[in-house]
Image (cartoon, grey):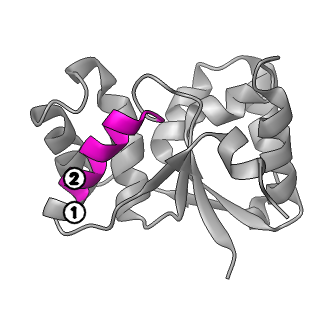
């Protein structure tokens, strides 16, 4: 079974950022080869509307057969709100919480992000997963694309 990796919006932009482009493009190469499924949400689509044209075009160029679109629903809103209520992050990071809750509820194997402040942060990850477990969800692996591609075979 192919790994299903939830990509937050930062990963798509990472393809055009000199600091992040190499591991990001390696990760997308795995998508293009059908080695992993790129899971994204309707929130990602909304955020990409505001992204530069090259980022939007890159997203549109990905092979549809290796993409999986999921939607934010009431269960996701409830879980994301819980992250805020328990102060894992502040209210201004609600969209980040939506990405994490979406990946959790849709059972992604990993969430990939370049957001080190609010998402790929050991203290935040512990907070998100503590709440996930208490609310009867599984814990979520949260990694940067560099961490995902660094040791691949």
Closer to the camera in the image, 1 or 65: 1
Q: Which residues are magenta?
A: 120-132
Label 1 environment density (alpha carbons within 10 Å; few <14, some 14–19, many ≥20): few
Quadrant of res 54? top right
58 vs 36, left or right, is right
Residue drawn 66% across the image and 35% down it: 11
Label placed on residue 98? none
Label 2 environment density (alpha carbons within 10 Å; few <14, some 14–19, many ≥20): some
Q: Secondary structure at mark 2?
A: helix
Residue position marked by numbered label 1 in the rendering: 133
- Quarter of the figure that contains the N terminus: bottom right
Q: Main secondary structure of the magenta part?
A: helix
Residue drawn 51% across the image and 32% down it: 46
Where residue 42 sits: x, y (%)?
A: 48, 45
Q: Is residue 2 visible?
A: yes
- Quarter of the figure that contains the C terminus: bottom right
């Amino acid at each position: 079974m192919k790994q299903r990796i939830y990509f937050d919006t930062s990963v798509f932009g990472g393809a055009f950022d000199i600091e992040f482009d190499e591991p990001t493009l390696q990760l997308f190469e795995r998508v293009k080869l059908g080695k992993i499924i790129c899971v994204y949400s309707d929130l990602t689509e909304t955020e990409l509307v505001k992204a530069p044209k090259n980022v939007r075009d890159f997203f549109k160029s990905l092979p549809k057969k290796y993409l999986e679109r999921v939607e934010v629903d009431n269960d996701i809103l409830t879980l994301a709100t819980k992250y805020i209520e328990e102060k894992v992050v502040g209210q201004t990071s609600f969209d980040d919480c939506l990405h994490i809750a979406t990946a959790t509820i849709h059972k992604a194997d990993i969430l990939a992000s370049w957001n080190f402040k609010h998402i790929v942060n050991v203290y935040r990850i512990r907070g998100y997963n503590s709440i996930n477990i208490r609310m009867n969800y599984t814990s979520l692996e949260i990694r940067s694309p560099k961490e995902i591609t660094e040791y691949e075979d």
